[in-house]
Structure formats: structure tokens, C-alpha cells
Amino acid sequence: MENLQINSEPRKPKVQDLQADVIDLLKQISALMDRASTALSLDRSAQKYEEFKREVDEAIPNVENLKLTMSIVAPMKAGKSTIINAIVGKELLPSRNAAMTTIPTEIVFKAELDRPVLRLSEEILTVFQETVISLKEKIQQLGPEQTQEKLGQYPHLQDLVKEIKETLGFPHPETSGREEIMKTLAELNDIVRLCSILNPSQDPAGKLFTVPSIETPFLRAQKIEQPDSSSDKLGNLVIVDTPGPNEAGENLRLTAVVAEQLRRSSIILIVLDFTQLNNKAAEDIKKQVQPVINLLGKENLYVLVNKIDQRRPGDMTPEQVQQFVAADLDLSEESDSDRVFEVSAIQAFSATKFLLELQQRPGVEIAEMETAEALAREALGNRWEAKLQRTNVEDLKEEAQYLWEDSVATLKSYLESSKK
């Protein structure tokens, strides 16, 4: 008996057991809310219980699939699309110097896929078919001169006007392949923006309750990092790219579909531009997400400060950035600054693309690589062209790994901690 050792540490419950318990509890709550709304059908409070039941019912499949939804909100050109592309491992979301995002887009990571697929609901297809028809009528009504005058600061929409007048077809319910997906998403976003300029009363985004959904393999996890037994996949990460307040434009409203996507999120991730930390866009974003934060709690809000590769002597230090952002977004608790992270999306993205190409094309020479120049620009400094001529694949691979780790180490830590 003296040699008998008793392990006093409590046994940790399995994820599957906790999952089953939570699902069972949610179903009980749903049934209770249903009984309450039925019993109080003649009372004003019945609607409240119906809304509670709907929210609980929406949560059940999330728990069944261990789904973590993270909505990303940012001012225009803060680097939101580049961050998402870096996480995905390839360029998947369209971007340009002018404002791009007008409708939210969902990115769902599925390990079993070998190429990305864009899916559009019947609702989206119907709304955009009707929008294209109304735009064609409006363009004919305005005539070429008045149409061109209205487009003013959006010259890239001239080609879309021409396509609508002549040959533009309707989007398909399913599109596969990176380039085709980017083309379709750019077209959808441009149609929304064109409608906001020429025919704002017909805003298609305001009619949507579902969003475009991209299912894609998590290429970085599959092909660069080798999984180990301690980091088994516990669930599914879903990222929602949402338009920021200063992406909207004068006639383009942030509609109910944006609010709905934020409400459905487990986490809100705000992206800010290091070079624009005094920009009032942060205040606008705070107003946009505040109702959701009131619902979810501040502990579900995180901030990425992008473009830290542009930090120069005399600029704010990392500690000062944390304090500034926490104060600016009213994250008043002392620990709140721990939810402010610095990243360089462009460096992370160039590193990821290089490492992926290296995995997919073993033995390739630098001169034959499509991603070597982009990485060299970020990793080798001002004389990158001359240095690139003297370097080899292994040296450039080392630079890419360093850039990735240095650029997004905090983001990776955040993503891991958010799963706990």
C-alpha cells in the first residue's frame, strides 16, 4: 500500500465528450425557448424567445462541426486581403489600389480539397441577375456621356459598363480555380459598386442575407508545416472578409448582411495600418463593430497592426503601438493590450508563396521560380536585384522561413490560442 501512487491530477475530458454535452444542452435550451414562445404567443416577449431559439439553433451546427468563425474588418488598404491570402497560402481574394470589398466573402478551410471552389447561393445568383438587368436599362437611359461622367473616380468600371451593354453573362453557382474565383469575386464587387454609383436605390448588397463562400485547402498547414500528434486538427476555421466603413463610398451602405456576418462570428479581428494609426478609420470601425462587441464581449475582439515593415527610427515602438491601439479602441483593461498584434502581411505572403512553390517544384532553380523576385524585394533590401543574382535556393529558403516566422509569429500564436 505504501508504494501505491495516486495521480491527483483531474483527467481532462475529451473534446468529443464536451462537444456532445454542449450539443445536448443547446438542444434543451432550443426546446425551452420554443415552449416559451408558444406559451407567450400573444405577448410581446414571444418574439424575443423566437430570436433566442434562432440563435441557439444557429450555434448547434457550429458546435457539431467545431466551427470557429472569424470576421475581419479593416479600413481600405490596411492589407486585409493580403493577410487572408497569406493565411490561405495563395492569392485568392481580389485587390486593387481603389476600394475593392463591397460584400462579405466567407473562406472555409477544407483539408480534403485540392483546389479552391467558390459557391454562390440561389439568392445571390437571383439578386445579381436582377441587378445586371437593371444596370443595363440604367446605362441605356443615361447614355455614354453621362455614364462616363458619373464614373469619374472609378475609371476601372468603364470596362464593366461595356460588358454589361454587350456580353456580360450571369455568374455560375460554382466556380473552381484561383484565377476564375478572383475574376468572379472582382466582378461581383464591381457590380455592387457600379450600382451604388449609377442606380443606388437598387443596391444588391442590401438584398442579400447569404454571402459568397470559398472552400479552400489550408495549403500552409498541409504542405509547409508537418503536423504532429500534439496539434491534431480540432475544428474548422472560417474567415469572413467584410467591407470596412471607408471602403463603402458615398452611396454604398454597410448593409444588413455585414451586420449579420459580424453577429454570427465567434471572433472579430480588426486590421489597422501602422502608417495610418492616427486615421479616423479606426474610430469608424469601432462604431461598426461596437454592437457586436456588446453582444460577444471584448474578449472576442483582436487587433492586427499591419505594415510594421515600414517602421522607421522614431516611430512608435511595439509597446507604444499596443498602448495606443488599446486606448483608441477603448480596450481599457491592462490585459487588453495583449490582444493587439503586429504583422507584416506582404512579407508573410511573399514568404508563403515562395515556400509553397519550393514544395511543389523540388529541385527548381531560382531563375525558373515565379515567386523568387517578390521574396527578394522583401528579404534582400534595396539592392535585391544584384543580391538575387548571387544567392541560391537554400539561402533564399532560409530568408523566407525567417520572414514568415518574424512577420506572423504573433498571428500564429493568436490563432492557436483562439482554438482553446
Image (tube, rainbow, N blue to C red):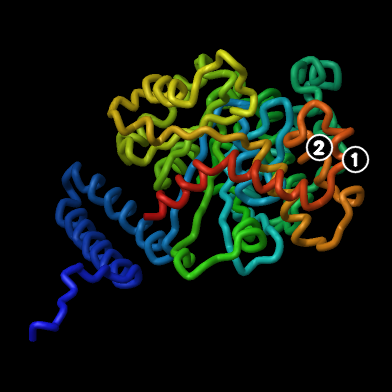
Q: Is residue 129 visible?
A: no
Which residue is drawn at the image coordinates 61% and 34% (left, top)?
344
Nearer to the camera, 219 or 38 = 219
Q: Determine the secondary structure under disc 1.
A: helix
Q: Is residue 202 left or right of residue 21?
A: right
**Quarter-of-image position of residue 405:** top right
Nearer to the camera, 244 or 272 = 272
Residue 189 position (above or below residue 249): below
Mark 2 residue crowding within 10 angstroms, few (<14) / some (14–19) / many (20+): some
How far across and down, in percent of the image, does residue 57 sit? 34, 59
The three-letter amino acid code for the residue at tag 1 is Gln
Mark 1 residue crowding within 10 angstroms, few (<14) / some (14–19) / many (20+): few
Nearer to the camera, 398 or 274 = 398
How far across and down, in percent of the image, does residue 308 sit? 59, 28
Residue 81 position (above or below residue 288): below
Q: Quadrant of the C terminus?
A: bottom left
Q: Determine the secondary structure under disc 2.
A: helix
**Labelled disc at residue 164:** 2
Q: Residue furthest left?
A: 1
Q: Is residue 395 left or right of residue 122?
A: right
**Labelled disc at residue 188:** none
Marks 1/2: CA–CA distance: 47 Å
The three-letter amino acid code for the residue at tag 2 is Ile
Q: Is residue 314 visible?
A: yes
Q: Quadrant of the N terminus?
A: bottom left
Residue 181 position (above or below residue 193): below
Which residue is drawn at the image coordinates 65% and 59% (left, top)?
224
- Closer mark to the observer between disc 1 and disc 2: 1
How far across and down, in percent of the image, does residue 210 sit? 53, 48
The mark nearer the N terminus, 1 or 2, is 2
Circle 1 is placed at which residue position? 389
Which residue is drawn at the image coordinates 71% and 40% (left, top)?
94
